[in-house]
Structure formats: C-alpha cells, structure tokens
Image (tube, helix red, strand yellow):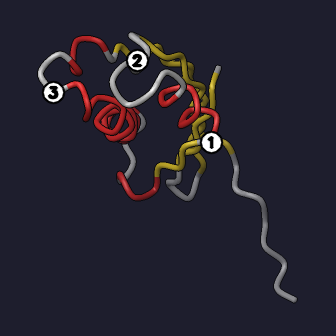
C-alpha cells in the first residue's frame, strides 16, 4: 500500500453567489443547468483553480434543481475549501 498524505487546507471561504443577475439572459428551461456551470466557473475564478479541479457537493446540485429547471434560487451560500494540491471542494454553507 502507498501511504497517501492528506492534503492540507490552504484557503477556506464562504461565498454568497448571486444567480438571478446571470440567469435573466437565458431561456427558462436552461436556467438551472447554466446556474450549475456558473457556480463552478465562479469558484474556479475566485479560488484561483482550474475549472476541472472544482468538485461540487451533491447538496449544491439538489438545492439548485429543487424547484425545477426553470426556477433556480436567486442566490446560494457556499463554503469552499482549497487544498494544497490545487483542488477545490464546495458544499452548502
């Protein structure tokens, strides 16, 4: 067995991401899908990580899709943690 050391936490932040402003310009049936992509893009920008390294918790997905594809929440609070290997994990705050 290889002993894998746990990654150290470098940064931990809580963000309140406004979705209403961005979702106005998309058709109603695409809003939840675009919201998920926007959350990932927002976190990669603010945590300075590659977009492929951003892992979203299932709770975020459930919260955005809770009222269907047409009505995602206006804002969402997320707790994001960046590790020393560059990966970012996010969950509901």
Name the residue: 50% across, 54% down. 86
Residue reaching furthest to the right: 1
Q: Is residue 80 left or right of residue 20?
A: right
For the residues marked 3 and 1, what is the alpha-carbon distance in whole angstroms?
Answer: 24 Å
Residue 43 in view here: yes
Q: Which mark is residue 17?
A: 2
Within 10 Å of disc 2 (Cα), the crowding (few <14, some 14-19, many 20+) is some
Q: Quadrant of residue 93?
A: top right
Query: Residue 58: percent from the left, percent from the top?
Result: 62, 42
Q: Which residue is mark 3?
A: 26
Single out the mark in the foreground, 3 or 1. Answer: 3
Q: Which mark is residue 40?
A: none
Nearer-N-terminus badge (3/1): 3
User: In the rendered image of this protein, does residue 52 appear above or below residue 74?
Assistant: below
Q: Are marks 3 and 1 in contact (CB under 8 Å)?
A: no
Query: Residue 2: percent from the left, percent from the top?
Result: 82, 85
For the residue pair 93 and 45, the one nearer the viewer reads as 93
Q: Is residue 10 left or right of residue 34?
A: right
Q: Are marks 2 and 3 in contact (CB under 8 Å)?
A: no
Single out the mark in the foreground, 1 or 2. Answer: 1
Nearer-N-terminus badge (1/2): 2
Q: Which residue is mark 1?
A: 58
Q: How many marks?
A: 3
């Amino acid at each position: 067995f290889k002993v894998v050391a746990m990654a150290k936490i470098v940064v931990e932040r809580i963000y309140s991401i406004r979705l209403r402003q961005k979702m106005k310009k998309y058709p109603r049936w695409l809003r939840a899908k675009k919201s998920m992509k926007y959350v990932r893009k927002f976190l990669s920008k603010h945590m300075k990580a590659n977009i492929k390294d951003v892992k979203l918790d299932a709770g975020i997905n459930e919260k955005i899709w809770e009222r269907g594809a047409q009505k995602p929440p206006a804002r969402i609070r997320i707790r994001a943690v960046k590790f020393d290997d560059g990966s970012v994990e996010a969950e509901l705050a």
